[in-house]
Image (spheres, helix red, strand yellow):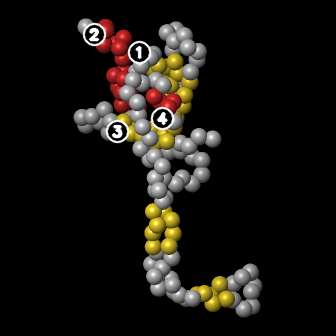
Amino acid sequence: MAFVQKWEISNGGGADPVTYYGRTENFNFFVKTDVVDEAGCAAGVSKQSGAVKAYQRRRYPGDPSPVNMPAIPSGRQYLYKANKKSGNALPGKTITFATNPATWDGGDEKRSFQYVGDWKEIIKYLESDAEKDIIVTNYTGARVLVCAAAAIEGRNR
């Protein structure tokens, strides 16, 4: 199974950025400007907890003679990993990009991502950077046809 990547795209101005979760290769298939994984392969960071007092620990329920655990004045060391995820759930809402069968002859391509941000900002970005005609479907089933950016630029001249 492929590792989920995270990247953020901002349209500039006063617009809030949109954060995507998925595979950057799948997103790059539809746009001209490639995006890169922001989390990357971050190394874990060793952290130190506060001092630990001496305490007793039972080896099993109802243990009549618990074991004494010594105090650790310097605290315990633990590994903290910023990109660690617990469980399979991804934040955000699902969005699907698909090639337009009327204009794409390379076979049907359909890729899904999760996003956190404004739906309108995604459409604005794709209108300016789409490499091919894309049918964008959001989590509610709403669909928008985004034409390739070069075709739109040609119409405006």
Dot 3: what SS? Answer: loop
Q: Nearer the viewer, residue 78 or 140?
A: 78
Q: Earlier in the sequence, mark 2 or mark 4?
A: 4
Q: Which residue is mark 4?
A: 24
Establish if 96 lies above or below 46.
Answer: above
- Residue 152 relative to residue 136: left or right: left
Quarter occupied by the N terminus: top right
Type of amino acid under label 1? Cys
Quarter occupied by the C terminus: top left
- Residue 39 relative to residue 61: left or right: left
Type of amino acid under label 2? Asn
Q: Earlier in the sequence, mark 1 or mark 3?
A: 3
Mark 2 to mark 3 CA distance (whole Å): 27 Å
At 74% from the left and 86% from the top, the residue drawn is: 63
Mark 4 to mark 3 CA distance (whole Å): 17 Å
Q: Which residue is mark 3?
A: 17
Report the mark closest to the observer, 4 or 1: 4
Q: Position of residue 20 (x, y in %)?
A: 45, 38
Mark 4 to mark 1 CA distance (whole Å): 21 Å
